[in-house]
Image (cartoon, rainbow, N blue to C red):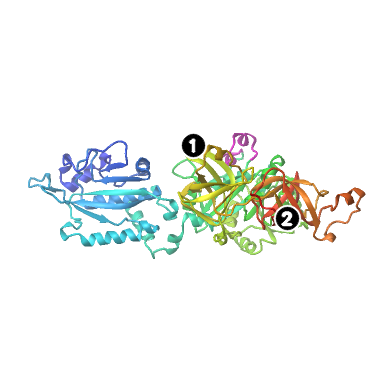
Amino acid sequence: MAIDNTMEKDISKQVAGVTEKRLIPVEGPEKEDGDTEYKRQVHHASVNRLRSLATQMSYRLDQGNGRCTYQLGVEDDGCHSLLDYDCITESARVLEAIARSLNAIVVERMMIQGEVTQGEDGNPILIPNAKPAHIHEPPFFSNNEKQYGKERLKDNETEEKKEPDEFRIKATPGMFTRCKLTIQKVETHLLDSSPFSLSDMSKSMKQILENSYEKSTPGVNEHDTKDSVTETLASRNIRIAVVGNVDAGKSSLIGTLTTSCLDDGRGKSRTSIMKHRHEIESGRTSTATTHLMGFRSTGEPVAARDKLRAKRKTEDEVARESHRIITLMDLAGHEKYLKTTVHGVSSGMADYALILVNSRHPPTHMTQHHLNLCCSFGIPVLVVFTKIDGCPPDAYKNCKKEVVKLLRAPDVGKKPYAVRNEKDIETCMGNLHALAPVIETSCVTGQGIDILQKMLFALPKRRRHEKKVDRPFEFLVEDTFNVPGVGGVVSGFVNAGELTVGATSHVFVGPTDDGTFMKTVAKSAHIARINTSHVTSGQSACLAFSLNKEMRKKLRRGMVVLKESPTSTKEFDAEICVLKGEGTTIRKSYQAYVHILNVRQSAYARKIELVNKTSSIDMPTTKGEKEDGVVLRPGSRAKVRFEFATRPEYIRPGMRMLFRDGRVRGIGVITGIPNMGQ
């Protein structure tokens, strides 16, 4: 398709009136469908025009299964547009930048000259017996992937050296030129971490692109060229669990942080991130969801809403613009959904936890339960007082007093520390194991939101999953999907190792109800909605498998994906500690609900052996207790052999476990697997 009519004046000046008749065919007419697009020129395009061009290019890429061809300097009917080299070069530069915004690159840029010239009467004519010069030029922007970068440039340089002198590119006015661009879609992590903004290009096209070219040149900004989406989502991704009572404002705070827009006091922020209709209507979160919050290298938050469009940015757009990612896990606060919250904390691999407290009411038993839950897993906590605007001073004073009492309790052992400025943040950073930073916020007025954002940006990475890359691949399945046209898809967390997906990527998925594993192929993978061919430890990802209909029915939460040595078991040994609190008695055949990372299932205590008899609370024993054997009470430590009630699971020594029968009763570590299943 040709450019707008407003550009005719500029073109007519360049070719001195020959634009009236372009009757020299060089290609066949353009087709409405297919992977080939004709363009006369792209010059000084507005934001809307650039978006239209990007949509058009995306369509051509889809038509060509990820590859398309652009013919620059050619009319819709296939005739030569009669433009000189500079016009074509500028258009090629713009189209290449648009391609980069679509996660695509130019794999070939071929300039063609020597087909048309001006006759004696000033009209263009086709050169008789012409042998047009086809000159390959390198892309304007460097590519990180080796196969698209230095190797191809060397080939181009060699080809240029072989060309005769008469076939060199001639940039003189009146030398009619056209260009053939071949564009290929690639995985985002092969490109720069900060693709070009279409709005920036529209402001100052040539300047922005030249600056971007300099930035992508090796040695100009070495730090930026090393950054990638994969590295950001693995080594610079901090996972934070957000817990608190049902009225603490967890979803509202997450909505305010991720969208950079204040709440209206009537649920505007929480509505933007809630998943189900009943959650929006009731205001209560019932599922565990994750939301990305991005920061640039300067500490500036990446707004999740584009100023030029009302639509919210997708996760891949936030990830590509960010140098550091905060993954906020929104967990349920109502006691009715406690099982979901416990599972979210157990399997979420959280680096830190935000304990939200409604400043207008004293903390409830659920606040205490969430605090004890996080401390049981050794997760450092940050206390955030919400709804501070309009809060009566006496109510806030009473609430703060109760929270301090909870933090200083023997089973928590944290010292509260009020954070009001950046100096306080620096003080907390090295002592998060002993301190509990306290921040006052309001999602309506914005009070404390800036300090909280700076605090989140300053938090160091606690879990070093990148150190587990050399271990065997282990992927924890958190959810399953059946996507039309794709097949069975699982989402989860890469706990160890790395995997390159493709036709030869054979993996084991299981265990199924009978304890066996299904051998299949991992076809493709997504990270933050970005297609990728490689996943590594520390990343949340989705994997698509080649499974038939019967095998897809067997997929469930709690499974694992392994590359080798799949095993399952119904029995395991663990060293546990019964938490102090409400009275509970544990003896042989005691049944509890066990959480082991992503595994959750009912289990029986088959064998109990005290580790330290003096650690349990001395209470008189009865005749019945002597007959039943060892009895555990709050404070006891013991070695227990558990047996799953329903089906075998994949577990290994070293995994942390938590068991409950309504309330959380104890924690422990798996020490061994007595009998391995088939």
Examine the structure image and report whether residue 285 is included in the region drawn in magenta: yes
Does the rendering let one see residue 37?
Answer: yes
Distance between mark 2 and mark 1 Cα atoms: 42 Å
Residue 374 disc label = none
- Count every numbered label the image shows and give the total: 2
Q: Residues within 10 Å of mark 2 (few under 14, many from 20)?
A: many
What is the x, y in percent for residue 184? 36, 49
Residue at left offset 46%, top offset 45% = 307
The type of residue carrying mark 2 is Ala
Place residue 272 in its image quadrant. Answer: top right
In x, y percent, where is residue 650? 64, 50
Mark 2 vs 1: CB contact within 8 A: no
Viewer can see residue 362: no
Pick whichever, 546 or 328, lies toward us: 546
Q: Which residues are magenta?
A: 266-286
Residue pictured at 61% horizontal, 50% vertical = 447
* 76 lies above or below 421: above
| Direction from residue 297 to residue 254 in the image, left or right | right
Identify the element where label 2 is drawn.
Answer: strand
Which labelled disc corresponds to residue 484?
1
Q: Is residue 391 above or below residue 575?
A: above
Residue 91 left/right relative to 340: left
Amino acid type of disc 1?
Pro
- Residue 593: image quadrant is top right
Instruction: Mark 2 or mark 1: name the one nearer the start of the chain.
Output: 1
Check if residue 235 falls in the magenta segment: no
Numbered label attached to residue 574: 2
Residue 591 locus on image (x, y percent): 77, 45
Q: Please, which residue is most extreme toward the front here?
A: 678
Residue 116: x, y in percent? Answer: 15, 47
- Quadrant the N terminus occupies: top left
Viewer-side residue, 71 vs 658:
658
